[in-house]
Image (cartoon, rainbow, N blue to C red):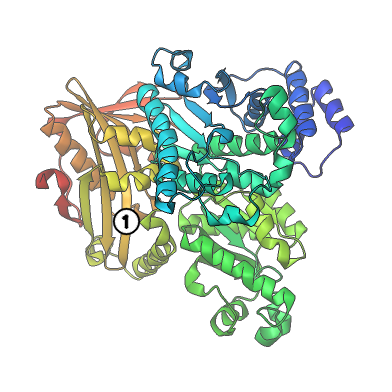
Amino acid sequence: MPDRPIDDAELKSLALSGDAAFWGHLAARSRQAATFSELFFLSTLRKKAKLHASESVRPKLRLALIGGYNLYPLHELVEHLLAIRGFECERFLGDYDNFVSEILDGSSPLYAFKPDLAFILPNANHCRFSGSLLDAVEQQREAAIGAADHLLNLARTFVARSGASVILANLALPGDLDLGSFRSRTLGADWSFRKAVNFELGLRAPAEVQICDVEFLSARRGITAAQDARAWYESKQLGSPDFLVDVAQELSHLIAARKQGPKKVLALDLDHTLWGGVIAEDGVEGIELGDSSPRGEAFKAFQKYLLGLSQRGVLLAVCSKNDHARAIELFEKHPEMVLRLEHFAAFKANWDPKSDNLQRIADELRLGLDSFVFADDNPAEIEIVRQFQPQVEGVLLGPDPAEFIGRLQAGRHFEPRNVTEEDLERTAQYRQERRRTEFAASITDMPAYLASLKMRGTIKEFDPLDVPRISQLIARSNQFNLTTVRRPETDIQGLLKRPGYSCFTMRLEDRFGDSGLISVVIAKVEGDVFVLDTWLMSCRVLKRQVEDEIMNEIFRLANAASCTKVRGIYLPTPKNGIVAGIYEEFGFVRTVDFTARKEFELEVEKYQMRSTKIHITRRAYEAS
């Protein structure tokens, strides 16, 4: 991350000189750009800089933009913002207001383009209630549902025919003063009707359709600032030039998030971050927290926001230079504390460098540092962490607690695609894991320890109810993941009944609690070979014989499919080195040995089922 923002002249000089520092500054400026003139300047500068840079070969995203507007120059802005995030694009631009025909005609150029993803931008002006303002509200609501279903059915049709993913924009609300306050008393008004349509779009959208919240974006900028009547009449634009920037920023973020996923851990300082003052000096009574002062109220509001993050699956950790006992005392005794010790998956309050403590937390949680965000009020601490742990994303909260929530939200590090039951229990699961670790430290006999856990496992075929969690694990698992092939929910849905594929999950619980869905396997039968396309597992359950039970199940299914051998694939990444030798541990023989791909095989009849301390309580295959 650049140390400071630079002006246009400096940036242009770096671009034309071929200085490698240009790209970091360009990315930072582009992410913060809020006006059309600035973003278009940066896009043009990027294209010039590419003429002076050696081209790296990167896979290209085939992106289709279709809808009810003229999509130029929106596509230029999107292309630039994706490029600075590491995504090269090949684009398809639909004709003005022709997206319905393009989707319904299976022989249209849209399908010939073979997109990976399509962005559908319906024309909000076409979304009006055709009846009377005085029609029954039930009739108006049914019309809104019908309008939403029409758009969602188009999106589903496109997905079914193309196999691509879809991002569907909802509708910007009108800023007209017409009807006055009466607009809030009927769904027949354009304002109310579009709000109802947007509401139904969000509630009814299937997993394979992601919503781009254009309504929110226009409200955030200001509806009148987002609109541009002249631009509509002259060139059929979506809105004002600066509003195009908002939409392009949002779309590029949504596309990038599909590949990169949200961060998993928020590590927090304590003094001047969760409360005002220094606990070691001011004591429990002297710190600033609570409703008795504006600053105290702001700190309390920040804690409430953090609790909300925890409740939707973000792991909270303390990483503070502090006296451990005094810090603990505040969480236990202060009546205004919203966050309590049970809300933290890890707690490091000592005088060691925060960069070291972050590594210890990562080791304890068995998560990569690139899944961490570190928030602190002190710029020096942010800089030290940036230097020694560059994978960690730093957020400088600054001196004013009233700004903490906004500063943390601005990074958009924790936005979920969906929320699963496992998310709601994640902190509790990591606290259970800490108890298991402490218990294991008291026992020197590993078989006795595993037996004492009283583990119970459930293995079953992919279930539609599990698809969100399966998708989440596939997107977020990096270490115990043999191939790291990412699959959107649409792909997983398609595997549920796909012939030739054998897909299963495993859940695990023990005396300390339920670990939830912790492993995913996707295999396909190729002739007499059972090929492991995907095998991943939560690192929380490593060394508990889950690997053995998974491999037992793989060979059991291979035998049931009349396969003579199992082939395992390993695609090395900087993060999955812990599984580099796992196939050989099970007796597989390496058959392909390239740098980027390794394959292993083992004959089914040679595999010896392994005995474990896990009691498999149910196999869904046997129940069906």
Mark 1 secondary-structure assignment: strand
Q: Is 231 above or below relative to 362? A: above
Check the image and name the residue furthest to the bottom.
285
Q: Residue at x 42, y 66 (%)?
A: 431
Q: Residue at x 55, y 63 (%)?
A: 317
Identify the residue under disc 1.
Answer: 516
Q: Is 420 above or below relative to 568? A: below
Left or right, residue 534 beside residue 461: right
- Image-quadrant location for residue 42: top right
Please name whichever residue, 394 or 584, is drawn nearer the observer in this view of the structure: 394
Q: Which quadrant of the figure contains the C terminus?
A: top left
Can residue 477 be seen here? The reply is no
Give the image location of residue 89, x and y in percent: 58, 22
Give the image location of residue 469, x and y in percent: 36, 48
> Dot 1: within a 10 Å radius of its alpha carbon, few (fewer than 14), some, or many (20 or more) residues?
many
Check the image and name the residue furthest to the right.
9
Left or right, residue 480 beside residue 265: left
Give the image location of residue 496, x and y in percent: 25, 36
Left or right, residue 122 beside residue 108: right
